[in-house]
Structures are given as structure tokens and as C-alpha cells.
Image (tube, helix red, strand yellow):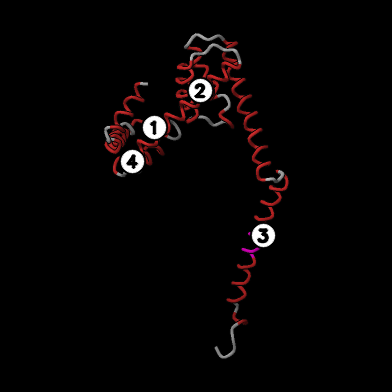
Amino acid sequence: MGCVVVVAALLVGWQYEQAIRFFGKLGTRFAKPLARVPVIGRRLVRRLPGQLDRLSSETFVENRVALQAFLLTLVMYGLLSARLFFIAQALRLDIPWYLLAMGIAVTQLALVFSVTPGSLGFLEGGWAAVLGLAGLTLDQFTTFVIGRRAFVLVFTLIGTLLAFVWIRESPAHLFRAVMDASRKRSEGRSQLEKGSLTEDEPGNAEPGS
């Protein structure tokens, strides 16, 4: 929450660009110790300072746009917290809403480092840290993470079916249409290449040229 307040103060005070430059310069100073990291350390040291210097010297987003994005992000996190709260209520779990809001921030940080499909394991690890520190039991944690995964899976399946009903095409027909379009495009490209090669042949030159 403290980080949110700091970021909000920077954005409201129209200091987004200055903050980005500050963090870029700070990261450049602390990039040298990364050379000691095995395997990838030297590569990071070669590339990271240049990227951080570019971050500190160039402006990517205007302050007004950054403020709008920040406010929209707060709304998004609020909706995600409400969704998780209703899931917990449906599973008859007494989990405070503020704990779920804090858990979203932690799990989003875990998603940055996830390498598994659907962030399987990393997402659960983030929730284990938050709910475990809050004193919830293993049964409550297991029920919550499984129920959340089931909700996301069912919602995705229903949304996919509704999408196919909306466009009035079956998945198999759409897949065939995509494959046919890709095949026609590759055939047209090969024909153009053959035509250009034929025009370049000496025997095809016009008489008198």
C-alpha cells in the first residue's frame, strides 16, 4: 500500500518522467554487481546499463497518460479483488477482502517470474505466502486456489463457446478457414517469386532490346 501511495503522489504531482529517470540512473549504478551472477551475469551487465540509460533519458509515456493508466489499473485491481471475494464467499471461506487485495499484488509479482503454462505453481506459491502469513489453514488455502482455478477454467470455456456462437462458426470450420487462408497466401507468394524469376531470364527478353 505504501508503494501505491508513493506512485500516486508522483503521478498526481506530474513527476512521472523525473521518477523514471531517477530509477533508471539508480538501476545503472546497481547493475555492476550482476556480473557475479552465474551464466547470465556478463550478458546482463552488457545489456542492462544501456537499457536503463535509455529508460532514464527517453520519455515513453506522457504524465497525463501515465496518470490515466494508473487510475485504470487501480480500478482493475479493485474488480479482481471483488471477483476473488465473491469466489471465496461461494466457497464459504471467510477471507477478508483486504487480504485478497494484497494477495493480488503479490501474485502479480509472482507472475513476472513464472515460466509454466498458466503460471501453474507460481500463482499458487504467491497465494500460499499471503494466506499462510495471514494464518489461514492448509484446507482453506487448498479450497481457495482450486476453486479459483476451476472458476477461471469454467469461465474461459463458457466465454469461448459464447464467442463461437456469436460468430456462428464451429471451431473446426474456423481452424480449416485459417489453414486454407495461410496455404493460399503461401501459394500466392511462391507464384510471385516464380514469375519474377521468369522475367529475369535472358531468353524472355523482348526482340530488339
Q: Check residue 108 for magenta coloring.
A: no
Residue 184, image quadrant: bottom right
Mark 1 or mark 2, which has the lower sequence index? 1
- Compare residues 117 and 184 and report the one nearer the observer: 184
Disc 1 packing (10 Å; few <14; some 14–19; many ≥20): few
- Residue at the location (35% across, 43% down)? 60
What is the C-alpha distance between the residues marked 1 and 2? Answer: 17 Å
Q: Which mark is residue 134?
A: none
- Tell me the kind of residue under disc 2: Ala
* Neighbourhood count class around disc 2 (C-alpha, 10 Å): few under 14, some 14–19, many 20 upward: some
Residue carrying label 4 = 55
Read off the residue under disc 1: 71
Q: Earlier in the sequence, mark 4 or mark 3?
A: 4
Looking at the image, which is closer to me, 33 or 81? 81
Residue pictured at 36% horizontal, 25% vertical: 4
Q: Secondary structure at mark 4?
A: helix
